[in-house]
Image (cartoon, rainbow, N blue to C red):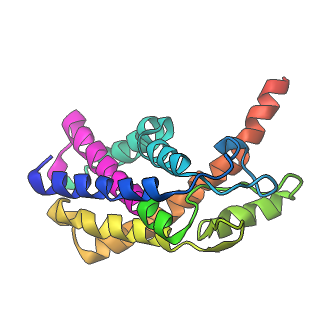
């Protein structure tokens, strides 16, 4: 990790610290996997920090999304500057992790200032399948407020756009153009939507397997 990359990464992380200290304690919410529209409570500062940690270095990020992303790039040797093989895989894996860290740091910090909850809140129990699919799609662009209402998530946009354009500073030249960053922003939206679909329906899959 070169000096410029390290400086941007550290600065992004440090931006979050004051926002956590300013969060007022509220009634603790339920576990993230059980959180839905009928039992929603706005997150505490600690829960915001937990969201950042889980989204950045949680099992899904480190053991699923990271290897898939790095493996896909290595398979097609994209970008070519990183090369093939395990060395190229490691570079791509690290590049994704620093980008995710920066984006999540921006979203967590901006969300604290704008009073936006970065967590995905599942549809209320009893919602039809079609309604749940619609909820997944719409919630990609919305965030809950302290009073339980939702609005367009400015912090999520800031995290996605900020991460993808800032990372041009340390990416390989072949993927560091403005058009490349814009394309990554689109992939960021689709990736978020896919992750929310997993959060929405995976608990149901687990319940079905436990009954057998």
Image height check: is 177 above or below 16? Answer: below
Horizontal arrangement in the rendering, residue 49 relative to residue 149 (left or right): left
Q: Residue furthest top?
A: 212
Image: 36 above or below 146: above
Which residue appears at 42% of the width and 56% of the height?
104
The answer to if 115 sits in the magenta stretch is no
Instruction: Give the quarter of the image for residue 136.
Output: bottom right
Please give the name of the residue rendered at 46% of the width and 72% of the height, measured from the top-left corner.
157
The part of the image, by quadrant, that contains residue 28 is top right
From the viewer's perspective, tell me whether residue 110 is left or right of residue 123: left
- The residue sitting at 35% across, 42% down in the picture is 71
Q: Position of residue 166 (x, y in %)?
A: 26, 67
- Look at the image and tell me in which quarter the C terminus lies: top right
Horizontal and vertical percent for residue 124? 82, 56
**Is residue 105 covered in magenta?**
yes
| x 30%, y 54%: residue | 14
Q: Position of residue 169 (x, y in %)?
A: 18, 65
**3 versus 177 height, above or below:** above
Along the viewing direction, whichever of 126 and 80 lies nearer the viewer = 126
- The residue segment tinted magenta is 81-106
Count of numbered labels shown in the rendering? 0
- At which x and y percent is residue 77? 25, 49
What residue occupies the far left of the structure in this picture? 3
């Amino acid at each position: 990790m070169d000096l410029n990359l390290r400086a941007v990464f550290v600065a992004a992380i440090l931006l979050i610290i004051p926002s956590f200290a300013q969060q007022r304690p509220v009634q603790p919410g339920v576990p993230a996997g059980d959180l839905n529209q009928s039992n929603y409570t706005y997150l505490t500062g600690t829960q915001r920090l937990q969201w950042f940690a889980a989204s950045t270095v949680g099992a899904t990020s480190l053991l699923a999304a990271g290897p898939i992303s790095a493996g896909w790039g290595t398979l097609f040797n994209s970008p070519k500057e990183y090369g093939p093989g395990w060395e190229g895989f490691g570079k791509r894996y690290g590049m994704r992790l620093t980008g995710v860290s920066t984006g999540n740091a921006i979203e967590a910090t901006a969300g604290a200032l704008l009073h936006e909850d970065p967590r995905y809140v599942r549809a209320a129990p009893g919602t039809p399948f079609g309604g749940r699919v619609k909820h997944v799609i719409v919630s990609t662009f919305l965030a809950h407020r302290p009073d339980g209402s939702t609005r367009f998530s400015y912090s999520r946009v800031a995290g996605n756009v900020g991460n993808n354009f800032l990372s041009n500073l340390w990416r390989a030249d072949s993927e560091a153009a403005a058009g490349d960053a814009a394309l990554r922003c689109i992939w960021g939206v689709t990736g978020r939507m896919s992750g929310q679909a997993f959060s929405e329906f995976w608990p149901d899959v687990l319940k079905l397997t436990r009954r057998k």
